[in-house]
Amino acid sequence: MKAIKLVYFADRLHLRKYGRPIVGDMYWAMKLGPVGSYTKRVAELDVPASVLDYAKKYIKPADEKKQSFVSLKPTDTDIFSKTDIECLESVYSSLGDKDQFELAELSHDYPEWKKHEKELKAGKKRVSMNYDDFFAEAQKEDILFGQKKSDLSFAKESFDELQEVSAFFAR
């Protein structure tokens, strides 16, 4: 769960700074915070064979329940942009010392999860999250995600343009 939360925070940071997420996952608001569906499937090694073969080069479960993993070799950084790496490193340096439950609790502070809190407390297991909500400001001051309004606005415009281009080519 810790890795899933760190990926969420890195996606959130990159989206707010550069107008696109790193992973581009489909996020669900759940009791313990946002969960990227693809990231979760990779962590559970529940992916197509071609992806599984690649993942098995880098990680293996440390226990039968697949609750923790062991790294088999250094990260393949060639698949990431410089800004991806910047945000991954920034999130890890700021939040890497927290355990999975602290990260889950922290994720509850952000508007994209808070928007669904009542539904989750009423018994819903999960609610689809919208990337547009990631651009809303949190209620409390935040050093990691507190971009200047002008920078955040520019990132949102970039994100919206990417969505339009993607929709155009999906036709």
Image (cartoon, rainbow, N blue to C red):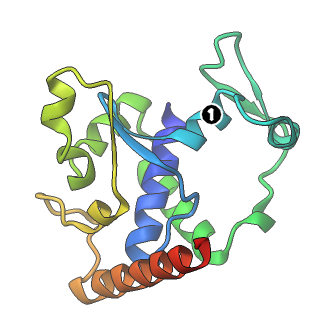
Front in this rendered view, residue 161 or 109: 161
Give residue 10's position: percent from left, percent from top: 48, 58
Front in this rendered view, residue 65 or 73: 65
Q: Is residue 148 visible?
A: yes
Give residue 133's position: percent from left, percent from top: 27, 61
Give residue 102's position: percent from left, percent from top: 33, 34
Give residue 65's position: percent from left, percent from top: 64, 12
Near mark 1 (Cα within 10 A), the count class, few <14, some 14-19 or many ≥20, is: few
Q: Is residue 96 visible?
A: no
On-image quarter of the C terminus: bottom right
- Furthest toward the top, the residue is 64
Number of marks: 1
State the residue at coordinates (85%, 44%).
54
- For the residue marked with disc 1, what is the amino acid? Arg
- Relative placement, left or right, of 58 versus 171 is right
Q: Quadrant of residue 134?
A: bottom left
Regarding mark 1 in the picture, which secondary structure is present there? helix
- Relative placement, left or right, of 42 versus 73 is left
Please name the residue that numbered disc 1 is placed on.
41
In the rendered image, the vertical position of residue 129 relative to residue 20, given as above or below:
above
- Relative placement, left or right, of 128 versus 21 is left
Q: Quadrant of residue 30?
A: top left
State the residue at coordinates (81%, 50%).
74
Front in this rendered view, residue 111 or 96: 111
State the residue at coordinates (25%, 25%).
124
State the residue at coordinates (16%, 63%).
141
